[in-house]
Image (spheres, rainbow, N blue to C red):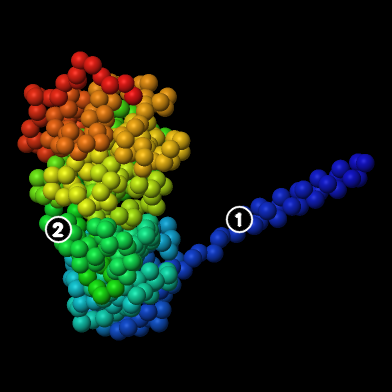
Amino acid sequence: MARDTQGTQGTQSQASNIWTQVESQPMEKIVWGRLYGKNIKIKSLDLNNDEFTAGRGEANDLILTLNDLPEKILTRISKVHFIIKRANCELTNPVYIQDLSRNGTFVNNEKIGTNRMRILKNDDVISLSHPTYKAFVFKDLSPNESIGLPEEINKTYYVNRKLGSGAYGLVRLVYDTRTCQQFAMKIVKKNMLSGARPSTNFSDPDRVLNEAKIMKNLSHPCVVRMHDIVDKPDSVYMVLEFMRGGDLLNRIISNKLLSEDTSKLYFYQMCHAVKYLHDRGITHRDLKPDNVLLETNDEETLLKVSDFGLKGLGYANALWHSSFYVAPEVLITGGRDTHGQRAKKVDIWHAMGVVLFTCLSGTLPFSDEYGTPAAQQIKKGRFAYGHPSWKGVSQRAKLLINQMLIVDPERRPSIDDVLQSSWLRDAPMLQKAKRLMKLDGMEIEEENFLEPPTKRSRR
């Protein structure tokens, strides 16, 4: 018995020693890039640290000497001439080159600029002190995400990971190679659009391109800005602002629902976005939580609406079908009589009524799971505040929802009416919105708010 115990202890001790030895051995570093010498006496260098420095100083990873460069070039090399870095050595992160020199570091004959950075891409040529002195060729060992994309895109942007996908294309994170600014690039396949139902806003590729061009001319703090458009025979490439906070749908799902104060702050910003569009004769027609994007992950954050007539291309796959948001007049007429002022009333149902209901309760006002088909519920305007979450919601919020979800579009409020709602008469919220939207001159209305009726309809 004693010998067995001793043997076991000995085995455990031996295993422990072996594990300690394994742990003490350095892990093999991932080579994420490589520099090949061009007009420099270096064959190749593996890049496997977060940062790689080159210059005349002895602390650099590559110390440049007369063995590497002619004297007339070496005298123009700084102590630290440039740094190449890739965060955490992860292949999914972009590669940056930073110019720390007095006389310049050049990429593909373009000067970076002292203390400035740019994205370094596969096969880029790095020149030292003068654009004609081509010293290195950079090889990126990460998967090439830009295969098959137009030259205009590859020349200007570094194409990174997929952000989301939809029925008509996908969304990728891209970086402007010169400014390092992040964008979201939507790739809309024209052949998929051509197969859409003729009654939809997005079945005509030319119409989609026209709407994209309209978006490029929009400028409002609560409307996603279009940065660039590239039109090709098979696809339209739209480069948009990148919103780090994701979409409103995922925010609601991750929190189960939003507080009334947060819902009000988001709703007010949505109102200003819709008003801006309506004042310019533009209707969205497909505003739902996954088409509303948030700037940061903070609870108090700027909100922007996106996807004008480009249904199905939110950052994340839609978890709730658009038919749950559709206005009754669209169902009744098939969308044939929803133009002009009537189209604006569609946005009030979609963007204002259903979205606010969803924010406050984490549920939908209309669903096939409620006993009858959602289309029948929508046509009759039948919904209820039956979920326990409604117990803590104010009557003024419910009143506003009742007004926005009126079946008759003629009786539905305009966006100006909604902005005058008594529920939005909230000075602290208005000040937060003003700060987030950066509208120092924004007038905050204090009069003529809609007041609740003496009798409220029961739901």
Taking 358 as reference, is 102 left or right?
A: left
- Give the residue at x 27% y 62%: 198
* Residue 188: x %, y % from top left: 30, 64
Residue kind at label 1, given as amino acid type: Ser
For the question of whether residue 376 can be seen, the reply is yes
For the question of whether residue 129 can be seen, the reply is no
Taking 173 as reference, is 276 left or right?
A: left
* Residue 284: x %, y % from top left: 21, 49
In this view, the mark in front (1 or 2)? 2
Pick the residue in front: 158 or 32. 158
Name the image quarter holding residue 125. bottom left
Residue for badge 1: 24
In the rendered image, the vertical position of residue 338 relative to residue 264, given as above or below:
below
- Give the residue at x 9% y 45%: 279
In the rendered image, the vertical position of residue 382 relative to residue 220, given as above or below:
above
**Crowd band around label 1 with a 10 angstrom C-alpha radius: few (<14), some (14–19), many (20+):** few
Q: Are marks 1 and 2 in contact (CB under 8 Å)?
A: no
Instruction: Determine the residue located farthest toward the right in the rendered image.
Output: 1
Gap between marks 1 and 2, in whole Å? 60 Å
Q: In the picture, which quadrant includes the N terminus?
A: top right
In the rendered image, the vertical position of residue 270 relative to residue 453, given as above or below:
below
- Give the residue at x 38% y 69%: 145
- Give the residue at x 35% y 47%: 323
Pick the residue in front: 228 or 337. 337
What numbered label is drawn on residue 54?
Answer: none
Q: Give the mark, 1 or 2, whose residue is nearer the N terminus.
A: 1
Label 1 secondary element:
helix
Label 2 secondary element:
helix
Residue for badge 2: 214
Residue kind at label 2, given as amino acid type: Ile
**Crowd band around label 2 with a 10 angstrom C-alpha radius: few (<14), some (14–19), many (20+):** few
Instruction: Determine the residue located farthest toward the top in the rendered image.
Output: 454
